[in-house]
Amino acid sequence: MMKKNIYSIIFGLTACGIAHSQVGINNNSPQQTLHVSGTSSGVSQNIMRVDGLNSTQNTAHENANSQKRVFANANGDLVILNNAQQNTLLNIQLPATAITGGNEGIVTSLTFTLAYRSLVHFESREGFTINTNINNGVLDNGQARSFGGYYKFTSAPAGVATNTRFGDKIISVSTTSGSNQLDGIFYLEPRKDLVLPAGSYTVSLYGFSGSAALPISVNNINQTNQQMRVSITPISYN
C-alpha cells in the first residue's frame, strides 16, 4: 500500500510538471510554452484578443483609422507602437546656382530628423547649363570633360559618413571644332536609397564641374520642376 502511494505521488508530481511546462488555450496539445488556438468569427483574418491592448483601456491608440502596430519589446511585452513618424516626403526647388570650372558647389540642402530606422530615398532633377562658348578654342579641342551632381551628408549621427559622395550622376562630353554638342540644358537625376538610423541629418545636393574650362550653372532658368526630394519610410519602430 505504501509503495502504491509513493507511485501515485511521483506520477502526480510528474503530471504537474508536464502540465505547467506547456499551456494550451483552446488547445489540448500545446506545442509551445503558451499555445493559443482558434479562429475568429465575422472577420477576414485571425485575431488574438488582449484586453489590455484595446482602444478603451489603452490611450496609445489614436482612432479607428490608426496605422499603429503592436510589437514585442526586448522584455517580450506586447506594446502599441507610439509612431510619431509616418511616411514623409520633403522637397525644395533648386535655386539658380553658378559653379566655377573644376569645382563642386552646394546647390541646396535639406535637414530632417528620423524618429526610427528608416529607408530614405534621395532624388533630384538638376538642369545644367554650360557657361562657356564652345567655339572659343577652349572646349572644342576633342578632350572629354565631365559634370554632374551628387549628395553628401554635411551632418549626420555618429557612424554615418559625412562629406562622402553618393547617388552620383555624371555626364562626360567632348567637342570638336564647329560642333554644338554642349548647347542647351543637360538634365541629370541623382538618386539613391539608403537605410539610415534614427537621428538628425542635413543632406546637400552638389553640382560638379570636372574641368577648369567648364563653368556651369544649375537651374538658371528657374524651373519649378527642378527640385530635390527626400522620401522617408520607417522600417523599425523601437
Image: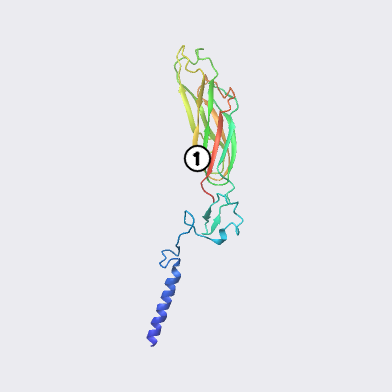
Instruction: State the image quarter where residue 33 is shown.
Output: bottom left
Give how far across and how far down residue 143 sits, in percent.
45, 18
Q: Which residue is mark 1?
A: 194
Residue under the image location 52 percent in, 33 percent down? 123
Quarter holding the N terminus is bottom left
Pinpoint residue 153: horizontal percent, then vertical percent.
55, 37
Number of marks in the rendered image: 1
Q: Residue furthest right?
A: 59
Q: Amino acid at mark 1?
A: Leu
- In the foreground, 12 or 174: 12
Residue 167 place in picture, x, y as percent:
49, 33
- Secondary structure beneath label 1: strand
Residue found at x 48% / y 29%: 169
Q: Answer with the quarter of the image where residue 19 lies.
A: bottom left
Q: Does 26 sit above or below residue 148?
A: below
Q: Residues within 10 Å of mark 1 (few under 14, many from 20)?
A: few
- Which residue is at 57% across, 30% downward? 106
